[in-house]
Amino acid sequence: MILNHLMGLYTHPKEEWHTIEKNHEALRSSLSHIVIIALIPAICAFIGTSQIGWDLGVGERQFLTTESAMIMSTGMYFGLFALAYLAFWMAKTFDAKPSYTQALELAAYTATPLFMVGLSALYPTLWFIMVVGLAGLAYSVYLLYTGVPIIMNIPEEKGFIYASSVVTAGLVLLVGLMASSVILWSVGFGPMYQ
């Protein structure tokens, strides 16, 4: 089942990581988990930005055109694969020999709380999105720190450093995406408002 580990990651994460490690799924199953779960923030952000409108706390609600909302929602879909590749690539430094499927499982299940936080985009008020997003990010980082030693089969001491490296790489990836967005917006590819 595609979502078979979802509740376990919320109720008993360490035991669920051991279950994931024992029963590695095929690449197809990991990809289908990502495809389905990653639709939540993409669809909710599309509806929130084009139909409900953003409340920034000052002035009227801001609405994106349908085309701009579709482009931004689609762009949210691809960062996870880059993070999985970075986790796979960095594993060699920490004497781990995971398959790409293991790295993809780690990235997919770690990012699941962030994907679920995407539901908050249906209430697009800036303070609400920030509070809920911070809670989702904190739980995702917790899942990463508990899951790395188990999924990557490395000692817990190295797992802490490895997980910290993955978090740092994720932050660098996020800053890179933000910088490229600013560059694209400055040359005319920015969002269009209604």
Image: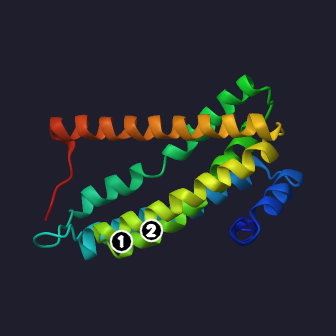
Q: Observer-nearest residue: 110 or 25?
A: 110
Numbered circle sitting on residue 50 = none
Residue 99's spot in the image, x, y percent?
A: 77, 36
| Residue 31 visible to the viewer | no
Q: Secondary structure at mark 2?
A: helix
Q: Quadrant of the C terminus?
A: bottom left
42 over 99 or under it: above or below: below
Q: Quadrant of residue 100?
A: top right
Direction right: furthest residue: 22
**x and y percentages locating residue 123 in the rendered image:** 34, 76
Q: Nearer the viewer, residue 40 or 87?
A: 87
For this view, does 31 lie left or right of residue 4?
left
Q: Are marks 1 and 2 in contact (CB under 8 Å)?
A: yes
Q: Amino acid at mark 2?
A: Val
Examine the image and state in which quarter residue 59 appears.
Answer: bottom left
Labelled disc at residue 128: 1
Quadrant for the N terminus, please: bottom right
* SS assignment at label 1: helix
Q: Position of residue 138 (x, y in %)?
A: 54, 58
Relative to 141, residue 39 above or below: below
Residue that mark 2 sits on: 132
- Count up the numbered dots: 2
